[in-house]
Amino acid sequence: MPSYNMNQVKVGLKILMDGDPCIITDTDFVKPGKGQAFTRIKYKNFKTGRVNEMTMKSSDSVEGADIVETEMQYLYSDGSHWYFMNQNTFDQIGASEEAVGDAKQWLKEEDLCMVTVFEGNPMVVTPPNFVVLEIVETDPGVRGDTSSGGNKPATLETGAIVRVPLFVQTGEKIKVDTRSGEYVSRA
Amino acid sequence: MTDGTDADWRPTAPLGNLRRRAEVVAKVRTFFAERDVLEVETPSLSTATVTDLHLASLRLADDAASAGLRGAYLQTSPEFHMKRLLAAGSGPIFQIARAFRDGESGRRHNPEFTILEWYRPGWDHHRLMDEVGELLSIVLGVAPAERITYRDAFQRHTGLDPFSAGDDDLERCAADHGMPPPRGELSRDDRLHLVMSAAVEPELGRTRPTFVYDYPASQAALARIRDDEPPVAERFEAYVGGVELANGYHELVDANEQARRFVADQRTRERAGMRPVRPDGRLLAALAHGLPPCAGVALGLDRLVMLACEAESIDQVIAFPVDRA
């Protein structure tokens, strides 16, 4: 993979830091009056999710990482892998449980997800921001019952458990924000 | 032939900002006309360039038809030419000049940019700071500036004394403020710059412009050095909203001392494996003839316009930055 010096780094560049795949989230060129220039970069580690900082000087470089992000359609899971297909090329890829992570509780067949592939292996699966899922099990909920804060747990068709308002019932479809895991509205 | 990205022909700066830019430039001209400071124009191309270790000048090819242009350099600032005018008896002068610095691109940098530079014979850096403050008041409508020494600014915002703090303390301070030191060799000044950029500068010029003056002697460039304990450079910088806006000096006029500094720079360049640069013989001759004692300042005009427009990035005030020139 190519290396990038401090004049070449840009936001969105995929790099390898201590062997981990990362993406640059901010760059800032700093040139003190009468001093050598630096480029400050902030980068997010795909594996840990943490954002770190680094200062580059003119002789420094960072290594590019072989990371590709593709929108893919979720096909099915056999319990050990989750399979996705590129709708343009029809290529299929199997993501491990670790790569799918939290996304697995939101995935319904045919959903479009962002699959991040590092050196040919799926590394992160990002579900759509919002999904519509059916409630398969929840208590009827008694109107006026505020003992639980005005909401109750509901199990969705994918197995996810979400807190929903008391007026929502089994069999209804609801919209969920996958980033927070919260009920948004009826669907 | 079109590749679908035809928006690339458009300016990055909104037209409203280009109008504000023109207003700022007009105010600058009025300011100096009222003060009898002469506007001058000096070359962008010269066979000479600066020996400064940290300025990368751009160079023309060796095959230009005009002999004087072969291998000529685009100027990183109008300083040397303006000093030659001062030595010729010009009196106070200003220039709105295009400057070129390779490798300088970012939110506040474009390799081709505009410097407002002026010189006041007979003044020192304090008197010139007054005038810079007046200009900022008129152009930006800001409150009168505050003044603080480099040492006090450093201590106030980090608790460290720049002249005696340990290298480890400086590095830790920079890292704590988001600029962990790069790997490899760092000079004392590099460490000071990291701390200044990370911890001190963002705090300067917040409610009113801040002038920082009396820099460490090692960061003097072409300023006089005053033999205090420790020795300090008679140099100042103006900050507005955490942005470095201007760099001024009580100018070095001693030809021998200037020659000595050029030679020192050359040696450092050689040791660092950098391209050799011959000292500007015409500047040295002008200094030998006699440069009147004076103070001079270089102000980033694009950044001044950024402040006037409340722009976050220099491409909002330059019509066509380098990537779409």
Image (cartoon, coloured by chain):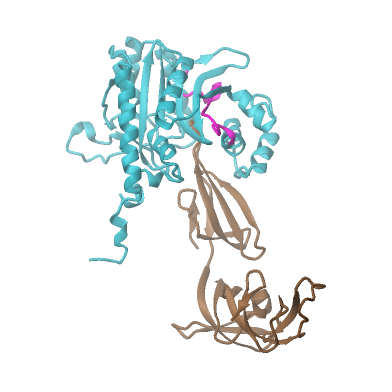
Query: In this image, B249 relative to B181: left or right?
Result: left
> What range of the chain is rendered magenta?
B203-223
Q: Is residue B221 above or below residue A43?
A: above
**Where does residue A61 sit, x and y in percent of width and height?**
52, 51
**Where does residue B67 sit, x and y in percent of width and height?**
19, 33
Query: In this image, B324 relative to B135: left or right?
Result: left
**Where does residue B78 sit, x and y in percent of width and height?**
33, 27
| The N terminus of chain B, quarter of image | bottom left
| Chain B visual colour | cyan
**Residue sitting at 18 percent across and 34 percent down?**
B66
**In-front residue for pair A81/B237:** B237
**In-front residue for pair B260/B313:** B313
**In-front residue for pair B183/B31:** B31
**Where does residue B10 sit, x and y in percent of width and height?**
30, 54
Q: Is residue A174 above or below residue A69?
A: below
Q: Is residue B211 visible?
A: yes
| Chain A visual colour | brown
**Residue sitting at 28 percent across and 23 percent down?**
B39
